[in-house]
Amino acid sequence: MPVVREFRLPDLGEGLTGAEVVRWMVEVGEVIAIDQPVVEVETAKAVVEVPCPYGGVVTARYGEEGEEIAVGAPLVTVAVAAPGGGSDEPVGSAPGSSASAGFSASAEVERPLVGYGVAETGKGGRRRRVGAAAPAVPVVSAAPAAPAVPAVPTAPAAPAVVPVISPLVRRLAREQGVDLTALTGSGPDGLIMRADVERAVAATVAAPVAAKAAGTGAAGASVGSVASENVVPLRGLRKAVAEKLSRSHREIPAATCWVDADATELMALRRQLNATPGPKVSVLALLARICTVALARFPELNSSVTEDGSGIVRHPAVHLGFAAQGERGLVVPVVRDAQDRSTEQLVEELARLTESARGSSLSPAELTGGTFTLNNYGVFGVDGSTPILNHPEAAMLGVGRIVAKPWVHGGELAVREVTQLSFTFDHRVCDGGTAGGFLRFVADCVEQPGMLLRQL
């Protein structure tokens, strides 16, 4: 007879303490296969699917969509077949109770999750339902029982198809009480975007405020009241970013220096490279190549200070992080071993990670382990910034927009393509002379990219 096994939320990497339920992928009473994803959760790093190491009938789910579950807390319980099929264990025996003590030693060993050494089985297969949906609490029974299988399953009514791809858009709509079926999407083929939901929320808030203002003339007070109650909780990625930036600002004595650079020759080189067959070279890829060369010249900046502040760790490899705007907000994907990649390989990896960031499909491993960050805030149309360091990294290069400006070139005033470079560094790892030398070298490479040939 089947016995109930409890699957708890595992540590999804980097010591995360919890995750928020984005979407349940199974129902109570559904038959699942070993290693089948059962829930989609949002961690501080990424949105990931969590597979269950047990196969059987789902008897309970823990946590509603939007609710945070701590690592180690129950996620689902599954009625699985007893070893050898000859156990007299009741279906509802609680995990770890005396009723389940008859498991053999091999049966008590959990299978690791997909991605940790076990091949996926049954993924993408058709899911089956057994009987009516069970209550959202563990099934407890004193007598042996098995899930009832109806002779003729009744097909559920087909739900309305809502053109929404992103689970984050669904969650925003759920939190704000927006009916997605009533919206017309502004994306391709009517796809509902985040902006569509936000417009619906704004319209919902504005309607009663406008009505009250017309009747009482107290529009200012009404708007102020609504605004004061609009508290957005810090959760998921936003919470992780807030905690990391606060820690960086609190612990790292950071300083920033900056310089204007004539990027005319760099842009000309880019146009020349893109005129030849092969992947199109981005400005970001050229700047990444400059950074790897500069860090080889100033290795003390590719480092971090130990947790207790007693030492400086010099990193032999450059794991280059870069700021990318995704649907979940600003994230920092990491290009591993950037110093060993050719310019074309940097182009391809930067493009792959950027596309994954836009689709919120970056894995936790692709968002951690950076040793230096490149921040191209010029894409937002701004010239300068003093960014907060990406803890525990010791340095970050910022690049403003490249724009035509009057510039003295060859002793004469000319219109040149100019950018502002800013460099923020941990003053514990180096003095201003090292930071200034690094920034000046980067600026020289931007102005005279042929210098890179000497370094490669």
Image (cartoon, rainbow, N blue to C red):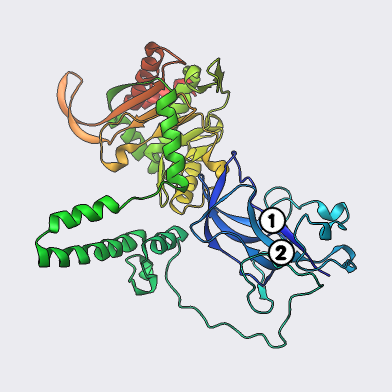
The picture places residue 433, in percent across and down from the top left corner, at 38, 11
Vertical comparison of 162 with 257: above or below: below
The picture places residue 73, in percent across and down from the top left corner, at 63, 51
**Which residue is rendered at x = 69% and y = 52% of the image?**
113
- Residue 290 seen in the figure: no
Mark 1 lies on residue = 7
Task: State which quarter of the image contains the N terminus.
Answer: bottom right
* Relative to 445, 156 lies left or right: right
**Which residue is rendered at x = 38% and y = 67% of the image?**
191
Q: CA distance from mark 2 to mark 1?
A: 8 Å
The picture places residue 165, in percent across and down from the top left corner, at 45, 64
Name the amino acid, label 1. Answer: Phe
The picture places residue 200, in percent across and down from the top left corner, at 29, 65
Most extreme residue toward the front is 142
Mark 2 lies on residue = 78
* Relative to 140, 367 lies left or right: left
Viewer-side residue, 236 vs 328: 236
**Sooner in the amino-acid sequence: mark 2 or mark 1:** 1
Could you classify mark 1 by the number of other residues whose Cα lies within 10 Å: few (under 14), some (14-19), or many (20 or more)?
Answer: many
Most extreme residue toward the left is 217
Name the amino acid, label 2. Answer: Val
